[in-house]
Image: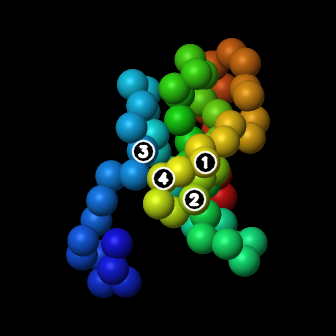
Amino acid sequence: MNSDGTSQAQITNSPGLDQWPTSVSNGRTEVAFASDRTGSFDIFKMLANGTYQTNLTQQTGSAEVQPT
């Protein structure tokens, strides 16, 4: 996506909800987001191009989580 919000592109593709994206400030271009693709909401991170999606929390139950 451009800095003005144009050229947005879908970079996740799962049967669950992928929401609350936020950029990760770690010297690399990464995005953290919440998803219920595993049956409960977990925090995932991925590269900004959508690759290397990694579950960081592996939450059990129905607790909602949101990256900040």
Residue 26 relative to residue 40: left or right: right
Who's the residue at 24% across and 71% down the image? 7
Dot placed on the residue nearer the N-terminal end, 3 or 4:
3
Above-or-below relation of 20 to 39: below
Residue 2 relative to residue 64: left or right: left
| Count of numbered tags | 4
Contact, CB < 8 Å: mark 3 with mark 1? Answer: no
Which secondary structure lies at badge 3?
Answer: loop
Q: Which amino acid lies under the numbered mark 2 shown in the image of this protein?
A: Leu
- Of 67 and 12, which appears nearest the observer? 12
The numbered disc on residue 52 is 1
Q: CA distance from mark 2 to mark 4?
A: 6 Å
Residue indicated by mark 2: 47
Q: CA distance from mark 3 to mark 1?
A: 11 Å
Dot placed on the residue nearer the N-terminal end, 2 or 3:
3
Contact, CB < 8 Å: mark 2 with mark 4? Answer: yes
Which quadrant of the figure has residue 63?
top right
Q: Which amino acid lies under the numbered mark 1 shown in the image of this protein?
A: Tyr
Residue indicated by mark 3: 12
Q: Position of residue 26 (x, y in %)?
A: 74, 72
Judge depth for marks 3 and 1 and give the one in front: 1
Q: Which amino acid lies under the numbered mark 3 shown in the image of this protein?
A: Thr
Residue indicated by mark 4: 50
Contact, CB < 8 Å: mark 1 with mark 2? Answer: yes
- Of 11 and 4, which appears nearest the observer? 11
Q: Which amino acid lies under the numbered mark 4 shown in the image of this protein?
A: Gly
